Amino acid sequence: MRNLIVVGSGIAGLFTALSAHRRGVRDVLIVTKGALEESTTRYAQGGIAAAVGDGDSWELHEADTLGAGAELCDPEAVRVLVADASERVADLMRFGVRFDTENGRLAYAREGAHRIARVLHAGGDATGKHIELALARAVRELGIEVRDRTFVPELIVEAGTCCGVRLPGGDAIEAEAVVLATGGAGQLYSCTTNPAISTGDGVALAVRAGAAVADLEFFQFHPTAFAGGSGVSRFLISEAVRGHGAVLRNHVGEAFMAGYDRRRELAPRDIVARSILQEMERHSLPNVWLDATHFQRGEFAHRFPTIDAHCRRQGCDPGREPIPVSPAAHYMMGGVWTDTWGKTSVPGLFACGETACTGVHGANRLASNSLLEGVVFGARVAQALTTPSAPNLRRQTVLHVEELTLGRRANVTLPVRDRMRALMWDEIGIRRDQAGLDEARAALETWASALPDDGVESHETANLALVGWVIAEAALRREESRGAHYRIDFPESRRQWRRRQLFVVRPRPLPGTHVIGEAHRAGMEVLS
């Protein structure tokens, strides 16, 4: 039996494996469905937020994180995130990450909803790539076993405890603990900054294993993806560009953000994304424009070389003309519910990174807190695995969990993904209402109940449908607007909804079909 299986190879998965190895866990296996170095992390541009510069403090970082989260962050989880940040950044540097410097000192950028420049970056706008390659290199150098290009369709759950993973063909690998770190589910939407691998696999695995999920109605849409091109994935134009002084303009050159929010381009992402959408609809525009032409000559290419190169390939010179941009699905703030040590509601099963929902993001993630979350809670998972007596900062937290029932129909054909993506974008996107949510939930429930074929693509589509269905259910029940969840029919935040939503799913099987995981009773309480 293995000591530890980590599913996924982004920053959260790799850092968990490395931290566990450093704490003496030697029998670690990383299983990832793509190449080891292929993950959403690789495409992260802006950087990693940490209060390590002069004039900054974890208390200020904490206040900014809580402010962006629209009164839905878990305060204890946020305190852990910001207090551990400096130590984890030092770990990254020890693993070989070289952050950018100015005059021999670390360089910091400012992004939306941060009151101070605290975002560390590498390679200008290639932070995620630098981190991904450094951690993957460390994994290989330490000899940690990797099974890449290996899809995990099922967790092994016996007597209510997760004890391994099942691979295609039925091969089982048992382990004392399994960590889900598979990233998000941006491929649910017809326009996303996420790569093709982001199909909600970790959340779907946890749901089928009977684990609680939380806050899935909150899906962040990045305001500025490069507009145009074919396919689902869109190239991200980092928030750091706006933090550096770029201005959003409409078709007549008007800097319109002042009319929507006093913080203008540096308002929280949900506000900027809705403002752009409203401006596009107001003037029947396919996109708006991000103007950096006032930067000093050559400054854009120097500070944002990756973005500059992409724009030039698309025929746009950012130093001379504004960049066409529009919103795109970007980050899943909900996920598998965990405590502050990465433990889920299923013994033996852990989660971290975008797959997990620790409560640090609340209803609207603060820019560049995502990479930080991966390393902070990845390290804490490793600590929990090697220090069983570690104190639990949320022992007194009691969360009500509601039960959802999902049938399993072998005779339903899974939809082509384009149909599902279009439905999600139109009805469970930046703006929502009851009629659209009802329509989407009904369709997603049918698709989510279908049994996938044996192929990886079919399993991915089933995973997307399942995660989408829970998102629709959560969005329909939350009758208010808060952060990234905006209901046209309930446009204000409501005090009674200043709470999180947790669900478990009870499978309703066909006779003779295999039931994955165990059913939970309605109204169960989770004590972390």
Image (cartoon, rainbow, N blue to C red):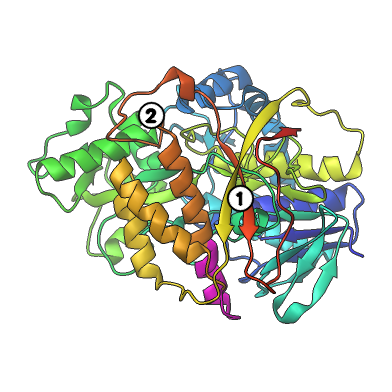
Q: Relative to the observer, which residue lies in front, 329 or 452?
A: 452
Residue 457 is covered by the magenta coloring: yes
Quadrant of the image occupied by residue 274: top left
Question: What residue lies at 55% left-to-right and 31% top-to-bottom?
Answer: 500
Instruction: In the rendered structure, find residue 480 and report the number of the disc placed on it.
Output: 2
Q: Main secondary structure of the magenta part?
A: helix
Question: What residue lies at 69% left-to-right and 74% top-to-bottom?
Answer: 512
Q: Quadrant of the N terminus?
A: bottom right
Residue 321 placement (x, y as % from top left): 18, 50
Question: Relative to 457, does residue 441 appear above or below in the rendering?
Answer: above
Instruction: In the rendered structure, find residue 447 and report the number of the disc placed on it.
Output: none
Q: Relative to the observer, which residue lies in front, 109 or 390?
A: 390
Relative placement, left or right, of 468 versus 420 is right
State the SS at label 2. Answer: loop
State the SS at label 1. Answer: helix
Residue 387 placement (x, y as % from top left): 91, 39
The three-letter code of the residue at mark 2 reads: Glu
Q: Relative to the observer, which residue lies in front, 281 or 85?
A: 281
The three-letter code of the residue at mark 1 reads: Thr
Q: Which residue is mark 1?
A: 355
Which circle's residue, 1 or 2, is located before the other in the chain?
1
Q: Relative to the observer, which residue lies in front, 487 or 165?
A: 487
Residue 159 is covered by the magenta coloring: no
Relative placement, left or right, of 47 versus 373 is left
Quadrant of the image occupied by residue 255: top left
Residue 249 placement (x, y as % from top left): 17, 39
Of circles 1 and 2, the one toward us is: 2
